[in-house]
Image (tube, helix red, strand yellow):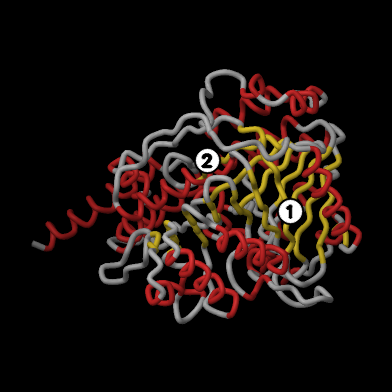
Amino acid sequence: MSWLVIFLILLLNFWAAGHALMYKRDPRAAWGWIVTCLLIPTIGPVLYFMLGINRIKTKAKKLKMEPLVSGGDISGRSFENISPKAFLDFQQTPDLIGMDNISRTISNRALLNGNDVKVLFNGNQAFPEMLEEIEKAERYVYLATYIFETNKTGKKFVAALSRARKRGVDVKVMLDGIGEYYSWPRAGSYLKKADVPFVRFLPPRFIPLSPFLNLRNHRKMLIIDDETGFTGGMNIGDRHLVDAKGLTGVKDIQFKFQGPINTQMKEVFMEDWAFCKGLNYPSRSGPSSVRSYGSAVCRTITIGPNQDLDKLRMLYTGMVSQARKSIFIMTPYFLPSQELVGALQVAALKGLDINIVLPAENNLRFVHWATQNMLWEILQYGVKVYYQPPPFDHSKLFLMDDMYSLIGSANMDPRSLRLNFEMMVEVYSRDLANTLCNHFQDRIKRSRQVSLADVDSRSMPVRLRDSLCWLFTPYL
């Protein structure tokens, strides 16, 4: 009997190690799991079974989870059907067709023109507009957020959603199962009392332990009556209310969209809603019938550990390779993939003006320390890095060549690149790019530039700390 137990344990260890060897795409992750499975009998394979196997992808296949297509045929060049004004702008942008080919193939969605994009800084500007649009809703209100605090701001949203529900508006709210625990009492209890329909995305289960604890829905969106929508990196809560002097609170940017792009955002929401409900996904829609509001050309791009795995990494890397003049990046968490690091190095060697703005004081210190350990890789090639002063800035922005903006919920870290469900919107608009460029310049003026000498002069204890945090980069 003892020999049989030993044989079964060895079989389990080698099965788990073989599975990691066959199905893990990242060599570092594969090596880590293989070593864990072989050197820690029983426990290693159990950990791999619980945390290492991507069951979301399997479950997605069972639910027939396929990327939906909006805005008509995507087989041809998207720019052939856009407005004359937008086309004139795009003719001045080098390699525009290459940019479109990259993101169209990655997203499986067409570009939609006729959109207006408004920039809302912090909750002070964003929350009043979001609440006002909820009050005006006539047909539906769909809200998804990672964190829904139950403080003063959160209660305002619950009350507005409840009033919309009583008016006969179709209201749906999606909360992340882990993000909901950032506030207590949980938002779900308030929504339930207010008779507002809601679902929890992969709620945690501890008995038996859920294998999905590490896979979160980080998307933030509010879509109202097809024609108005909001997205960005902002959660709902008092934390995003910044005082008049800009000294307290969490800074962030939200974007208000009016136009056809909201039909794509709606489809993303309905995919997630159906996933939470265990339903089949909606059928694909045809071209949008929403009227034109402006000249911005937009497209949604979904990211997640299902069929959308690695799309954001490919998109960032591809767009950096297409840049011809400048790249501006603002993110709270900067732990890029090696492919993206290489693309930034090459772009800098080509003479592009590359600026990366990071928070000087991070709410996750271990991420900040890990970032310090890798900055030399880009600083040595001329990439400019800035630390902006407190309060903590949660904004996620990617700006390229005074024309292209990529905005949404994703950070530049392994969690957003591989683990989280995220939604981004790419916008071709010189007006938006000009607004965001001015914002970047304002933040850079207030920031401290980081030099290669600063990174190299860290003391040995600090280097060891930063290196240790960097070692766990795939799991941060």
380 to 364, vertically: above or below:
above
The amino acid type found where label 1 is placed reads Val
Apparent side of residue 406 relative to residue 349 in the rendered image (left or right)? left
Q: Which mark is residue 119?
A: 1
Q: Is residue 23 visible?
A: yes
Apparent side of residue 349 relative to residue 96 in the rendered image (left or right)? right
Q: Is residue 469 visible?
A: no
**Label 2 – label 1 distance at C-alpha:** 19 Å
Pointer 2: what residue?
264
Residue 426 on image: x %, y %: 65, 40
N-terminal label among 2 and 1: 1
Q: Which residue is found at the position 8% from the left and 62% from the top?
A: 1
Q: Quadrant of the C terminus?
A: bottom right
SS at mark 2 in the image: helix
Q: Which residue is found at the position 44% from the left and 61% from the top?
A: 173
325 to 97, vertically: above or below:
below
Number of dots carrying numbers: 2
How crowded pointer 2 is (Cα within 10 Å; few <14, some 14-19, many 20+) is rated as: many
Residue 298 on image: x %, y %: 64, 37
Q: Quadrant of residue 127?
A: bottom right
Apparent side of residue 15 relative to residue 248 in the rendered image (left or right)? left
Residue 272 on image: x %, y %: 41, 50
Residue 55 on image: x %, y %: 34, 50
The amino acid type found where label 2 is placed reads Gln
468 to 94, vertically: above or below:
below
SS at mark 1 in the image: strand
